[in-house]
Image: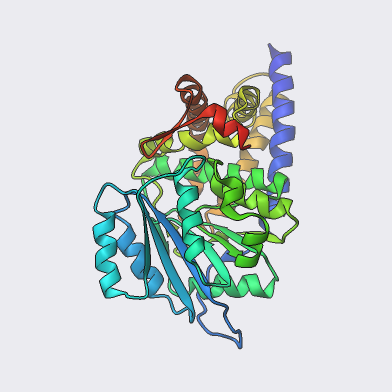
Amino acid sequence: MNVLFSVLSLISAFIEVGTVLLWFRYIKKRPVFLEIDSSNNGIIYPALSVIIPACDEEESIEQAVRQLISQDYPNLEVIVVNDRSTDKTGAVLKKLKVQYPQLKVITIYDLPPNWLGKNHAVYQGVKEATGEWLLFTDADVMFSLGSLKKTLRYALEHTLDHLTIAPDLYYGGVFYRAFLTYLSFAITATVMFTNKVGVGAFNLVKKSVYQEIGGYEAIAMRVADDMSFGELVVNKGYKQDFGLSGKGFIIVKWYDNLFALLKGIKKNQFAHFKYSVVTTLVICLYALLVGVYPFVGIFLGPIWARALCGISVVSLFAVYNYLAKYLNISRSYVVIHPISVLLYIGAILNSMVKTISQGGIEWRGTIYPIKVLKKHI
């Protein structure tokens, strides 16, 4: 058994420490949007259209719209696409339209064939957009004052075609926040290797680039539309950058609690791995080896193998320590790291089993067959 523990510790430490070192090299080159500077600095801001797809968002859409319209951006257009809502979203938008005549509201009653709901809503919103730049966001995302000017200014100064930002996740209990912290690390590590990314809370793109790459028509049946859009931008040869929201810059309340989050992400996880059972299982084994085993291995095997596991845990602590500087999290969440990994593995396997057993993905009351989804990968 000592041989087995030694081999596992060696492989785990090699992968873990290597990934963390590469992660630090990558993350320190990423912009962190913290300070709010509303000055123009001589910049002529281009027209910006913000597009929000909204399906049953009565609880958050009013605050989201008010915060956007209150921005000090000089040439701003806000478009909300009411996508077949069955709650009071339509009534809320009607009230807001009276108060803010400049608000554009598009109502969708039916979903055409070969479209996912959100993707179709964004597509319809773009058709009505007049801005030189487009910002795709969600109905539960809140923007601090000056955030639009700061991000547009950054995109212009760095001659970007696409800028995407991971939002601040500020709420929830200890296990919820620890799980989100692990997700932040895991997603950023994945982006580090692929250099292709999109975040649903903040996808800012030139309208001309959107049109040249085929827009949302090109990803009409892609479940992970935000990541798929980011991949499309890079694959077509355009310049992309990925940043982080500091505390309070761009905020999203993703789900109410950990159980709701785990249930919600089952839609995307199997899709992220191209509906491949082999890929999904390999990812789960990898997560066990580097995310769980080091915390167990410090108690198993010869002393040097335990020491290697200790090094892996310390390297993970360095990640949590760095993230705590910018996000509303605690360094102590590293202790919950293996539990977060196990929960994520459970979510991945649940996503795979559910998708296969029901023959597709159910989202917002619509079932999309897996055979059809695979054709659009």
Residue 241 seen in the current view: yes
Residue 162 at x, y = what percent? 64, 62
Residue 240 at x, y = what percent? 68, 59
- Which image quarter: residue 237? bottom right
Residue 43 at x, y = what percent? 61, 84
Taking the view exactly as shown, the residue that stands out farthest to the bottom is 42
Q: Looking at the image, what colour scheme do you see?
A: rainbow
Pick the residue in front: 83 or 330.
83
Q: Does 38 appear above or below 243?
A: below
Pick the residue in front: 252 or 170.
252
Q: Residue at 48% x, 30% y: name it.
A: 347
Q: Residue at 68% x, 51% y: name it.
A: 24
Left or right: 51, with 316 as reference point: left
Position of the N terminus, as image quadrant, is top right
- Which image quarter: residue 91? bottom left
Q: Does 308 appear above or below 234?
A: above
Left or right: 190, with 146 as reference point: right
Q: Residue at 72% x, 60% y: name it.
A: 238
Residue 329 seen in the current view: no
How many numbered discs, if any? 0
